[in-house]
Image (tube, grey):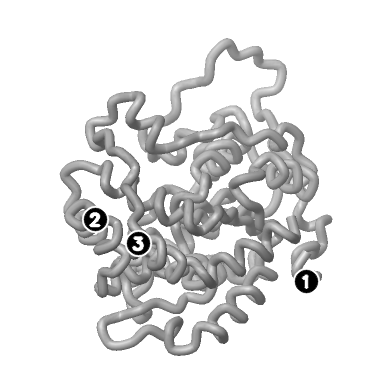
Amino acid sequence: MFNDTWNYALGKSRGVAVRVRRGMRATRKPVPDPIWTERQRRGDPITWWIGPQIQFLHLEKTGGTALSVHMSRRFHPAQIAPDLAGMQAAAGSVSTNDRFPDLTTETRWTARQTRLLCGHYDLPALREISGDLPKYRVTVLREPRARLLSLYNYWRAITNSTVPEIRIAQTHDLRAFLAHPDPIIRNAIDNLYVRRLTGLYADAGSDPFRTNPDAALSHALKSLGHFDRVGVSEDMDSLGRHIAHDLDVKGLGKVPRLNALASMMAKGHPGIQAVEPAPIAPEAEALLAFHTCFDRIVYDAVRQAS
């Protein structure tokens, strides 16, 4: 554990998923209400979560989809936060001053009413959303080099996208992509863990992370103390067991494996094309090391504490 905040008052953190239709023997899950979003449809319409809000900071390409789907089954769809456009941001597509620009009173209120809040946020945004509400906050990290390569190959596989960073990935080889100067790319690939834990992003004129990376790293390591659990994707079952123990919930221990890209390819998803893993030249390998060196320290600290 990084500090005492990781084990704060578990009496306030414990929760339970209650079957609201007692005595009913269902042979199949009821059809969800059509007003629910795709994310909310992962929930169980005959289950109701009694406990603190669960906040999951989902960092891209860390295996977080598997964990969020697994946890969603303990919540009624109405308890799961929808994809709130004002709270969602494409990875690294905004600058320091306009991150989550549409985080309005309405979206804050909506987020605070739900019991499961998952998404590609950063830690400062999650803390602003939740305020003083009782919460249990979790995130998962992946070996940084593998995460970055997975992100690049995933973006290359997406078809007909107009998202700038995805278009850049599709029109540049790995070395050129990693060397691209656009802040959109910098914020998505340059030590993402440190940036998302601290809220330090590049814009056209400056990069507060790169101005003082040692201070940023120290800030990021201290920020881990704002989570109740931080795990690694290489040992997701251990993270599931810890979460189950903390919240006193059965059945969370074994997290099913889910490879989002492979799954979409297997299902013939219309927005995905098959791609071969990008070859890695020596120049690209050096850039991979540059863009993950501080994230590696954060990842190793979490792995040692898990």
> Which of the image's four quarters has the C terminus?
bottom right
Question: Is 285 above or below relative to 146?
Answer: below
Q: Residues within 10 Å of mark 1 (few under 14, many from 20)?
A: few
Is residue 142 shown left or right of residue 253?
left
User: CA gap, disc 3 to disc 2?
Assistant: 9 Å
Q: Which mark is residue 173?
A: 2
Tell me where residue 187 appears, x and y as whole percent: 37, 70
Q: Hey, which quadrant is residue 166 in on the image?
A: bottom left
Q: Which mark is residue 284?
A: 3
At 29% from the left and 69% from the top, the residue drawn is 179
Tag 2: residue type?
A: Asp
Q: Hey, which quadrant is residue 89 in on the image?
A: bottom left
Tag 3: residue type?
A: Ala
Tag 1: residue type?
A: Asn
Q: Which mark is residue 3?
A: 1
Tell me where residue 109 appears, x and y as whole percent: 48, 62
Is residue 129 shown left or right of residue 8?
left
At 34% from the left and 24% from the top, the residue drawn is 267
At 35% from the left and 66% from the top, the residue drawn is 92
